[in-house]
Amino acid sequence: MSLLIVGSIALDNVETPHGKVVHSLGGSAIFTSMASKNFCRSNIVGIVGEDFPKEHLKLLTDNEIDTQDLKVVSGKTFHWDGKYNNLNKAETLDTQLNVFADFDPQLCEDNKKCDYLFLGNIDPILQLRVLKQMDKTKITACDTMNFWISGSRSKLVEVINNVDILFINEDELRMLTGAQNIFEAVQKTKEMGPKLIVVKRGENGSFAYSDEFIFFAPAYPIRKVIDPTGAGDSFAGGFMGYLASVGNFEEITIKKAMIFGTITASFCVESFSVNKLKEISIDDILVRKEVIERSIQF
Amino acid sequence: MSLLIVGSIALDNVETPHGKVVHSLGGSAIFTSMASKNFCRSNIVGIVGEDFPKEHLKLLTDNEIDTQDLKVVSGKTFHWDGKYNNLNKAETLDTQLNVFADFDPQLCEDNKKCDYLFLGNIDPILQLRVLKQMDKTKITACDTMNFWISGSRSKLVEVINNVDILFINEDELRMLTGAQNIFEAVQKTKEMGPKLIVVKRGENGSFAYSDEFIFFAPAYPIRKVIDPTGAGDSFAGGFMGYLASVGNFEEITIKKAMIFGTITASFCVESFSVNKLKEISIDDILVRKEVIERSIQF
């Protein structure tokens, strides 16, 4: 089945203790689609400026990522400039929205019919507009961030109420609910509407929470994290891609999707930008699946 | 097989968002033995003052915890006064060593022959003295804390070099090694001598690390943590108790020990002091084992 991915496309400057890249390919829609492409057909929705290198567009089409709704307009591409001092938290040095300020996703007829939808971390108003355009989607999912929780709470709550899956990290969960205990916070969020909450815990892994079950996945042990940018989006990409490839929403499918999300995120952080994600195959992913299996089965 | 447990025995004042207790039973040897007693014969080594209530001694003997080396001397029992504002980190309001200042464990002949040894978080000099008294111990383990890492580093390193298992939390690992990445830090610690490092991550669970394998255990999902005091010690108690009950050091045994440590810690935090630990049976533990199995198997 097909997965529609809506989000930012960026040219980022990123500095970590392991180096620095300038105007490198980034953005939530990029990381998500480069992670999901190993599992299913992925269609990307986004906007870039005339400065967006042709080689990046070629990278997407070479990976059979559909770009019908990737608009190229006059102006400059969204730009984020960030620095990680300790690899756990990014410091934003500069953000230039550029053409992304006018992003108003209008889906083509093909994309309206995608079976699976992932709404990357963008303005909840835009997430709602995309949701309204979709036709008979099987499963919808969204990501968000602290900026929208504090600044656009009511619209965000409407989005959360209208999706099947919410991807969220621990700090955001606490901010959204006011609960300090993480299991209390996730239950309160669950009551806001989604069938499933996927809680991202960085180097401590993740867990999935539904009315029927809870499932914990560890982070894949990476001894040298080069750049954590895009880890959450590539987790979502692996998760949603696997879900779309199987086509059901059963407990075992969701558990395996958590593992595939974990693995795609682990590849993401081993390089800057999508440099590692673009090299890996499903075989590389399956090797890590075996390692994870041994590290949690008893 | 039998497990010897050396550590503090205390009368604590503890305040958390859920209440306050005064002069309640505590200390590393108490939490560890009350967790291990479900699995194996446990022998406790410690010191208390004349103020130590008889009912606490009775609790130990009622649970078949051997107290041959629990010395009652003139003076007051070790006292810790702590407050948790957010349940993640305790603020120490007062510490009175009292008779614990003269603690110098001298083992009786029976205890020297115990098959398994757990050295709770005490002065590394004392940990070394106990190690030297042991005769043909199968497996030795120790816990420690930031205070000894900064203040008694060389003695602590000697202890670590001489035990089979080190229990340690993430902050302590980073402090001990200087490495920020947790998997780099654990590898560096592994090279200091132990066969196995057990890393405690609080509400994010734990992992075991050896040359042959890594194993991740989630924290058991507790929605209302009453008091986290003793969680680490009761983890160690469940772990070491199960290990001693099986009598080997195979991968599958260690993995199951991680799960039993997780479960005993989950009961500990559901009440002040050992109030919950003293009530549970092996059947209660096995119910939670099934829940954990479903939450990590896929």
Image (cartoon, coloured by chain):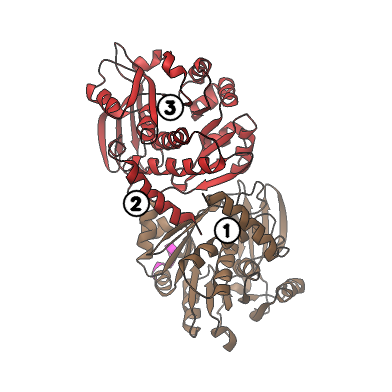
Chain colours: A brown, B red
Q: Position of residue B105 (x, y in %)?
A: 43, 15
Q: In the image, is residue B226 above or below residue B144? A: below
Q: Which residues are magenta?
A: A149-154
Q: Amino acid at mark 2?
A: Arg
Q: What residue is shown with label 2?
A: B223
Q: Residue furthest right?
A: A55
Chain letter of the residue carrying label 3: B
> Label 3: few (<14), some or many (≥20) within 10 Å?
some
Are discs 1 and 3 located on one and the same chain?
no
Residue B110, above or below B17:
above
Q: Can you tell which quarter of the image residue A76 is in?
A: bottom right
x and y percentages locating residue A181 in the rendered image: 37, 51
What's the mark number on residue B115?
none
Location of residue A244 in the rendering, given as x and y in whole percent from the top left corner: 56, 74
Element on which disc 3 rests = strand
Name the residue type under label 3.
Answer: Ser
Give the residue at mark 1.
A262
Residue A72 can be seen in this image: no
Disc ID at residue B2? 3
